[in-house]
Image (cartoon, coloured by chain):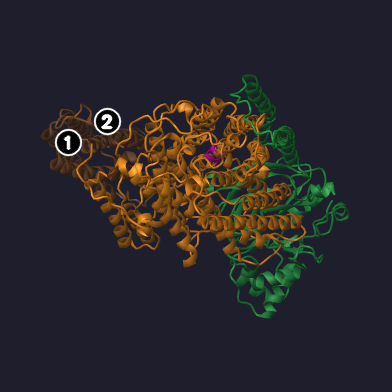
Chain colours: A green, B orange, C brown
Amino acid sequence: MLLSACGRADLSPLNPQGEVAKEQLNIMKISISIMTLVVVVVFTLAIYVVIRYRRRPGNDGIPVQVEGNHKLEIIWTVIPLILLVILGVPTVQTVFGQAKDYSKDEDAILVNVTAHQYWWKFEYPQEGIVTAQELVVPKNSTIVIEAKTADVLHSFWVPALAGKIDTNPAGNINRMYIKTPDKTGIFLGKCAELCGPAHALMDFKVKVVDEESYANWISAMKAPAKLPEDPAIAEVFEKKCLSCHAVGDKGVPVYPDLTGIGDRETVAGILVNTDNPKYKHEGTVYDNLYRWIKNPQEVKPGNLMPTVELTEEELQGIARYLADYKLHYESEELRNNDATSDKEER
Amino acid sequence: MAHGSHAVKRYKGILDWLTTVDHKKIGILYLLAGGFFFLIGGLEAILIRIQLWKPMNDFVSPDTFNELITMHGTTMIFLGVMPVIFGLMNCIVPLQIGARDVAFPFVNALGFWTFFFGGLLLNISWLTGHVPDAGWTSYVPLASTTFSNGPGVDYYVLGLQISGIGSLLGGINFLVTIINMRAPGMSFMRMPMFTWATFVTSLLILLAFPALTVGLVALMFDRLFGGNFFDPSAGGNIMLWEHIFWIFGHPEVYILILPAFGIISEVVTTFSRKRLFGYSSMVFATVLIGFLGFMVWAHHMFTSGLGPVANALFSIATMLIAVPTGIKVFNWLFTMWGGSIKFTSPMLFAIGFIPTFVMGGVTGVMLAAAPADYQYHDSYFVVGHFHYTIVGGLVSGLFAGVHYWWPKIFGRKLNETLGKLTFWFFIIGFHLTFFVQHFLGLTGMQRRIYTYLDGMGFNEMNLISTIGAITMGVGVIFFLINVIVTSAKPRTATNDPWEDGRTLEWAISSPAPEYNFAQLPLIRGYDCYWKEKMEGNREMQPAEPLGPIHMPSPSILPFIMSVGLFIAGFGFIYHQHIVAAAGLAVTLICMMLRSVIEDHGYHIEPEEIQAKGVKA
Amino acid sequence: MSGHSHAEGVLPHEPEKATLEGRNKVLGFWLFLGGETVLFGTLFSVFIALRDQVNGGPTANELFSLPVVAAATLILLTSSLTSVFAIQAMHRNQTKATVNWLVVTVLLGLAFLGLEIYEFVEYAHHGHTFAASAFSTSFYSLVGFHGGHVAFGILWISLLIWQVLRRGITLHTAPKVYVAGLYWHFIDVVWVFIFSVVYLMGKVG
């Protein structure tokens, strides 16, 4: 009960998995301890005073009028100041600690995040690859995020791993880092700045994998595009989809990259790829792709993907093709450890 | 010495209310209009909570939801609570300092009407279907024409701009009134705390609102005239909006809470039968809070990338405000210590205020620690925090003040039973609604989302929050019933209906006569009326002989000027520049008329005063 | 409200402060100027933040012609001086002199505005229009706002000239004239900052 009160291990700042989030919880704990003390003192005084000094029948006189008490006033000025120092010192230390720039670190993995209405682009400049909606990273690593927006303000937030950073337009790029934990897992990401009607639906994932899986994934992402087998579907796909999207080395990299979309946790960040009926917003990968492509506006009102004109056959063909576009990068270790694409409580 | 003979302009009925420059009537207008907008904001809140009671709900569309949250915040802050604050200041401060009106009665009326028409303009957006939906903070680029194409955000810009004029005028008015028009013997350190709070708040208004004015002008120029303040492609910078908005926005929340602190001081002392513990520290703390309030704005921007030095400095500065606030809380508690506490409705609200506001303040200190804020920011933790301070704090304080001063304003006491029902439903509903929201934030729920997936762990807490909101609504309904039921009763309140009044307003009749004081009183100490009572005097001693009282003339110009601005607002919103110019011309011409036409008011003669027939 | 007693025809030395209404107006106006200081301060901060964002258009250094701006400055500063003379005349109860100096102030103000309009038209020809860049928007907003204040002041003082001509210097007209004088000094001080921060610093870079 208590643990569930701390929230999901893949989502809650109270149940942090990443080092940065753990440091932040530490500050929270210090502040809440001090503040609990304050609240207890105030509540005790208030309850005492309200009971002890209530007007009783027969006791109707004028109480002694007290101007003040210097000693008391000094006490309740000095003690709060001391409490603030106790909170202030670790706060300042952590502020500077978490502002450290790891981008020049040899082992750091650089990711450029670009937020859009209503999706996330992740670019790995060291590897020359681009993906969307799912940030695949190895465990035990330092990920340096440089974040910006392509349109309005958004905010990049993976609560279980680290605090958030706003995504500003190009002149004000922000940097933060995530230190991934020593175990694999999938962590929920959220947009944390009002960005339009679909702000609530702009979820993403951070997928922490083992070294082997990560290496596999990088190579798979660099591999040439796999196009639909059926030439008719391939033609439609190239004409109608690759004018905005990219797979592998083909297409236009303006809108979400579709390489490997078949093994992602969600479609469009919000349609969960599972058959566990838990989120009221799930389906198989095929069903979700079908639903999305058929009517994107129904899923995410106000997003920029139009309803593409496709025959039923073409729609099914493309959905099938994308659902099967899997990169198979997961190592055996990962496949054994990892939960399935359902998000079980840990 | 009389000034020739003036035909005494006295209007009746609605024309009286449209032309009044009497601070007591203007105060009532503020209370009514503020109450009206508060109800609209409350309705918006209920709709929001209904949408959020369960996951993936479709009670309202995402667009409508964003409109609801924008209008709820904007309406509640600018059109709901601020006018009620101004209403109480107007009704009470001149009476507390022994003045016959505020320094600028005409400007006072103008302040009311501009607020009213600005608020009307903003809320008319609902009827046109073009409602602002970029949040009450209206961040760019979302609020720019690129991403918010229709007139919605323009309603926000123009409505607030016009309304803000009213606030600024009110601030200047109270500053001059308090500095120049205190009765003989009323030194600064003998002023009641509510007056001190008004004084510091007015200074904050004077220095904070102009920043908002510039921000709104800049946004207006960008949206309507192709300006580039916030357009990155032309060299503009969106961070400017954040800075300007919060340089206004943070002092704004102290503008909201300081008057409530003043009310609590009045109510707690009266119903404990004890003078305020540590009056000088209370004054000092009020001033310090006001001053520090200008030093902390960037704690709203910890995640925008200001850098560690700024984040560290603003963290510390923000934490510091807890110290003077704590001083106040302890001073209230020690006022009650050793006192004789009577649990009237106003006192219940004041006692409810103290622990509730402390909880809000405590989460504020938690938010002040920047690294923790990287998690809390833009989550429901923040929503919980500011509702604790503004609703649990400020609104409780306003309920306390309204119940406390109702007899002084209207000549009737509100019904105690209904008052207690209001209190209990409101406070219990309040904690139900907002306590769980801290945990929603702490477990990963962002704010301003129109829905959430099932299975996130948010369901139960959202349901509880919605039930709480409805409970609060019931409390408000009890209050409305109370107001209606009470208005049908005869005006039987005595000058000191609570029998323990300490401050000057309780020395005169309820309601006060049109001229407030037949003779300006001589102030012989702090808690001046209590002092007289303790020495066996039923009344204040006069500081001047009975003579003709000079009164300002009523005028329709403030009303017309505000209508002019209202029309201009529409003109700008719909790009009809002729209409905009015409509206502005109306206002300008009225200003010119006001300058050129000399109206020196009229006099109430001693015979009229002695006949006691001169009522408000 | 105003308990003024005076011998007929003799005004006190500082007539604007001799009544409660007068004192209220003067204090209220000082406070208003405090608010205006914050307003212009914010506009200045915005300008300073955006001054280099010329979006490919002309820079401050290329645009500004110091001689014109210096002339405008001289005119406005002089008009501030003449407004002082007007107040001094008012304190000496010299209605004619008061009006004359106010008229000169207004004329100088009009000359300042004329120069500024000429200046803006020149800039527009060089591509420095309101919508051209962040720099130009903030420039026109700041300097234009100031110009708007000058225009309003001219209108206001003209109305006061008319009132003083009709009613003379009284306990009612004196505070109005005094307060208008304060306003005029304020916009002069703002101009000094504009001259320094916008034009001088723009030229020097």
Q: Which residue is mark 2?
A: C17
Residue B66 x %, y %: 57, 59
Quadrant showing the N terminus of chain C? top left
Quadrant showing the C terminus of chain C? top left
Q: Which residue is mark 1?
A: C169
Residue A132 visible in rendering: no
Residue B97 x %, y %: 43, 34
In the rendered view, tell whether residue B340 sits above or below residue B80: above
The residue closer to the viewer here, B364 or B171, is B171
Residue B248 x %, y %: 48, 42
Mark 2 packing: few (<14 Cα in 10 Å), some, or many (20+)? some
Distance from disc 2 to disc 1, alpha carbons, whole Å, reads 13 Å
Amino acid marked by disc 2: Lys
Residue A285 placement: quadrant: bottom right
Residue at figure coordinates x 53%, y 57% from the top left: B71
Horizontal side of residue B582 vs B400, given as left or right: left
Residue B612 placement: quadrant: top left
Q: Which residues are magenta?
A: B257-262
